[in-house]
């Protein structure tokens, strides 16, 4: 079967995308160092890699590094609203890889593009959220016939794969890149923390200082979102379902309460739970006039826009990417980016240096799968420690920072149990 070279919105947008990619590239020293090794080693020679990640400048650098490492790469999005058409065009125009991604496509075309990336019959898949994996375990099983393994970028994706593994259905080994220390400690916390507020502030042009921010979910992402809201001068309320996380939020100085109580107080609401129906009808009805809701967790079901639409008497676009829903009580509740990932659907996502770390992990994990995938069990596996540590070591080296090393005596001391 012949594979189309690309399906993008407008190939003439390429020069704009190229500029964005080059800006990201010059600020991604860790990925550049790994890319250099890939160019020398060609670990992916003769292999096909299908990638489903947010199609924007940093991802372009990852996809290009894989191609430069010898792979034939097919890139598609993992969220129809985060695709940047100029970046997709630049990659398509370069001729270095296949790109199937168009901003704002409906569910049908989104899945069509995922399938086009799989028609490639990949040896390795890289997922952000597990959409390729879900197809490879259902209607596209046959397209996984050459698979030696995969890598997964985010919390919800890892969670979905672990369920498949528990049910004995996982059909290839997957590196849980999200669980690497150099991923979730930085990307989920500092990346989400910064990019969520960049997106909210740019989209609303409203002040955060002095406002009340409700953060639902105090996991790795929630910590970052709450921390940056506090730094911007907001009063922060956290809602949780895990008592330990709730205590952690309390000790950090936040108020902790149920969403039923928080709904009345918030000016901004940010969900980061990976769960569904965190903000529903009764919460919208209790909110102040003008309250702003958004989601930074995986799916667009955390803020139930479906229920909001059911009760609203009117819906108006109040500003680009903000819909105001008029409620029967006379109040308006605003939703940014249709309740999809606010930092990516209303912004550029995580800052470049953060994705440098995440994607340096991805590139190394893909190389690990290329080398060892055939011998691995069909399980969700942790990112090898050497891969994780290398990211931090390269990053410190680029900043000319050296750290202490254990002396032999210290090593002996911390490895012994007696006096
Ligand atoms: P996590 O597991 O560390 O944290 C999730 C937290 O939400 C947990 O503490 C959990 O107890 C809590 N929670 C679950 N259901 C809840 C509910 N109904 N109400 C209140 N709290 C609830 O996960 P994480 O790494 O913080 O990721 C959270 C979500 O964000 C995932 O879906 C992940 O895929 C996604 N994510 C998004 C970005 C982004 O760029 N926007 C980045 C990384 C991860
Ligand atoms: N398919 C999901 C994707 C989850 S997004 C969806 O519905 O949108 C969460 C992941 O996006 C994070 O783990 C993070 O690593 C990644 N991410 C955040 N900013 C990014 C960026 N600028 N470019 C590429 N990936 C990004």
Image (spheres, rainbow, N blue to C red):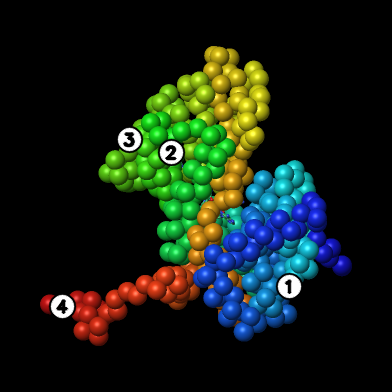
Within 10 Å of the Cα at label 3, are there few (<14), some (14-19), or many (20+) other Cα atoms? some
Name the side, left or right, on which 183 lies relative to 71: left
Q: Position of residue 9 (x, y in %)?
A: 79, 51
The number of discs equals: 4
Res. 255 mark: 3
The residue pinned by badge 1 equals 72
In the rendered structure, the answer to whether residue 183 lies left or right of residue 49 reads: left
4 or 1: tag closer to the N-terminus = 1
* Callout 3 touching callout 1 (CB < 8 Å): no
Instruction: Mark yes or no: residue 395 visible.
Output: yes
Which percent across, then down, holds residue 106?
Answer: 75, 43
Q: Which residue is mark 4?
A: 418
The one nearer the camera, 187 or 166, is: 187
Q: Secondary structure at mark 3?
A: strand
Residue that numbered label 2 is attached to: 215
Separation of residues labelled 3 and 1 (CA atoms): 51 Å
Which quadrant of the structure image shows residue 376?
bottom right
Q: Earlier in the sequence, mark 3 or mark 2?
A: 2
Residue at 61% in and 38% down: 337
Could you tell me how far apart the alpha carbons at marks 2 and 1 are, in whole angstroms?
41 Å
Spatial distance from mark 4 to mark 1, Cα to Cα? Answer: 55 Å
**Element class at badge 4:** loop
């Amino acid at each position: 079967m012949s594979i189309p070279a690309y399906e993008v919105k407008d190939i003439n947008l390429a020069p704009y995308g190229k500029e964005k990619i080059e800006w990201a590239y010059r600020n991604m020293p860790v990925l550049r160092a790994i890319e250099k090794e890939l160019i020398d080693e060609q670990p992916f020679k003769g292999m096909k890699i299908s990638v489903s990640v947010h199609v924007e400048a940093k991802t372009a650098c990852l996809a290009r590094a894989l191609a430069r490492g010898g792979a034939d790469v097919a890139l598609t999005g993992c969220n129809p609203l985060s695709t940047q058409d100029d970046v997709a065009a630049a990659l398509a125009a370069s001729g270095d890889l296949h790109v199937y991604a168009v901003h704002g496509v409906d569910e049908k075309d989104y899945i069509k593009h995922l399938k086009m990336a799989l028609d490639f019959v990949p040896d390795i898949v890289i997922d952000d959220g597990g959409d390729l994996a879900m197809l490879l375990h259902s209607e596209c099983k046959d397209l996984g016939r050459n698979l030696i393994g995969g890598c997964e970028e985010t919390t919800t994706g890892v969670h979905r794969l672990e369920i498949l593994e528990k049910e004995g259905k996982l059909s290839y080994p997957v590196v849980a890149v999200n669980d690497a220390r150099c991923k979730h400690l930085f990307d989920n916390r500092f990346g989400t923390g910064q990019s969520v507020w960049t997106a909210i502030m740019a989209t609303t042009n409203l002040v955060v200082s002095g406002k009340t921010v409700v953060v639902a979910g105090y996991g790795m992402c929630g910590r970052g979102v709450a921390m940056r809201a506090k730094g911007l001068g907001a009063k922060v309320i956290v809602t949780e379902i895990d008592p330990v996380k709730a205590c952690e939020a309390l000790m950090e100085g936040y108020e902790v309460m149920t969403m039923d109580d928080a709904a009345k107080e918030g000016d901004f609401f940010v969900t980061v739970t990976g769960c569904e129906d965190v903000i529903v009808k009764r919460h919208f009805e209790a909110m102040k006039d003008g309250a702003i809701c958004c989601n930074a967790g995986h799916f667009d079901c955390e803020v139930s826009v479906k229920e909001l639409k059911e009760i609203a008497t009117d819906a108006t676009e109040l500003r680009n990417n903000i819909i105001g829903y008029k409620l029967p009580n006379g109040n308006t509740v605003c939703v940014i980016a249709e309740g999809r990932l606010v930092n990516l659907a209303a912004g550029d996502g995580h800052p470049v240096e953060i994705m440098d770390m995440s994607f340096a992990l991805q590139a190394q994990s893909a190389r690990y799968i290329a080398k060892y995938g055939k011998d691995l069990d069909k399980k969700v596996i942790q990112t090898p420690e050497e891969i994780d540590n290398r990211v931090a070591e390269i990053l410190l080296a680029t900043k000319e920072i050296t750290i202490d090393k254990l002396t032999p005596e210290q090593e002996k001391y911390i490895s012994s149990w007696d006096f």
